[in-house]
Image: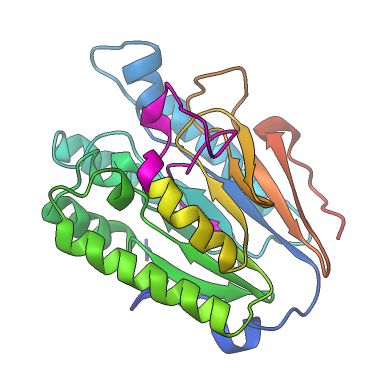
Amino acid sequence: MNWKTHTKKKKFTFFDNEREKVFQEPFYFIQGADIQLGLIQRYIEKNPVPGWSKELQLAELAVKKVNAMRPKPKFFVMCGDLCDAMPYDMPLIRQKQEIDFKQVFYKLDPVIPLVCVCGNHDVGDQPTEDSIEAYHKSFGEDYFSFWCGGVMFIVINSQYFYDSSQVKKQAEDHELWLSNTLQTARKYYVKRVIVFQHIPWFLHDPKENNLESYFTLPQDVRNKWLPILKQSGVQFVFCGHYHRNAIGSYEGMDVVTTSAVGAQLGNDRSGLRVVRVMEDSIDHTYYNLENIPSVINL
């Protein structure tokens, strides 16, 4: 298995970035989140010796459905929590989960690249230098950008905003890179910018005093970055982490939280989001895995 991350020097290299800066024709991409191999038996079923066969079945179905879609999606982005085992708590189990994750998603059609977003279970709730480095070795860069179909896509590591106490230098580098990337978007008046991250800025309302603070970024971080994102032309932020669907808006910038491919914590069912990029609009629809359409009208 020749696993490729397509990331280098903070860029996703699958696409020709210069060519992709210009909108050519309508397209769509697939967004998923939280396949999180192992969560169902560990957390939902409380199995003392949890496996991850149920998530693997869901992942296999997701890949099968995506491969059958016509026309082909431009890419498939997984917004964090690729596996459940924390890298520094259960390294051996983590290693096995990563192998199984790669074996399933390696079956994606080669023309559909997988874009991996870093989640808290991928580097730990309190990431360390070692856990960040381990992620790099397994899945490539933990933040980067790319162009596709006239859209600037920015992938960030939201864990730096949640708890950077053990990785202050890495968090500073991440903030500087994000600031510079957004400044570029402002400088060149980029028409469309989309951000991918794991933890949402908020679920429904940017001013919400969320009792479930585990599922959103802190208010002070939110207050700092939301205006910058908006001023930089960001139209959508697609997230995961909540294991339920939610949507909110900050001054017209939509924060879309997509439920899990794996374990559900609410009333949704395992699924994926189809995001269509038209010449003058962007829309999105969440589908249960069983109901993912085979034909997307563009």
Residue pictured at 13% horizontal, 56% vertical: 129
The correct choice, above or below, for 205 with respect to 182 in the image is above
Q: Position of residue 9 (x, y in %)?
A: 33, 78
Q: From the top left corner, tell me how far across and down residue 94 is, in percent.
A: 23, 40
Task: Kindly indicate the quadrant of the structure image that contains residue 86.
Answer: top left
Q: Is residue 165 visible?
A: yes
- Magenta-highlighted residues: 195-220
Identify the image quadrant of the N terminus. Answer: bottom left
Residue located 48% across and 42% down the image: 200
Near-viewer residue (204 or 149)? 204
Q: Evaluate whether residue 112 shows in this view.
A: no
Reply above or below: 187 against 87: below
**In the image, residue 74 lies at what x, y percent?**
65, 65
Residue 72 to residue 252: above or below: below
Q: Residue at x 36, y 45 (%)?
A: 220
Most frequent secondary structure within the magenta stretch: loop
Residue 160 location (% of width, % of height): 28, 52
- Image quadrant in which the C terminus is located: bottom right
Q: Tell me the residue at 24%/59% (across/down).
A: 171
> From the viewer's perspective, is residue 293 above or below residue 77?
above
Q: Is residue 203 left or right of residue 253?
A: left
Q: Is residue 75 magenta?
A: no
Q: Is residue 214 magenta?
A: yes
For this orientation, the residue located farthest to the bottom is 18
Query: Is residue 248 rendered to the left or right of residue 296?
Result: left
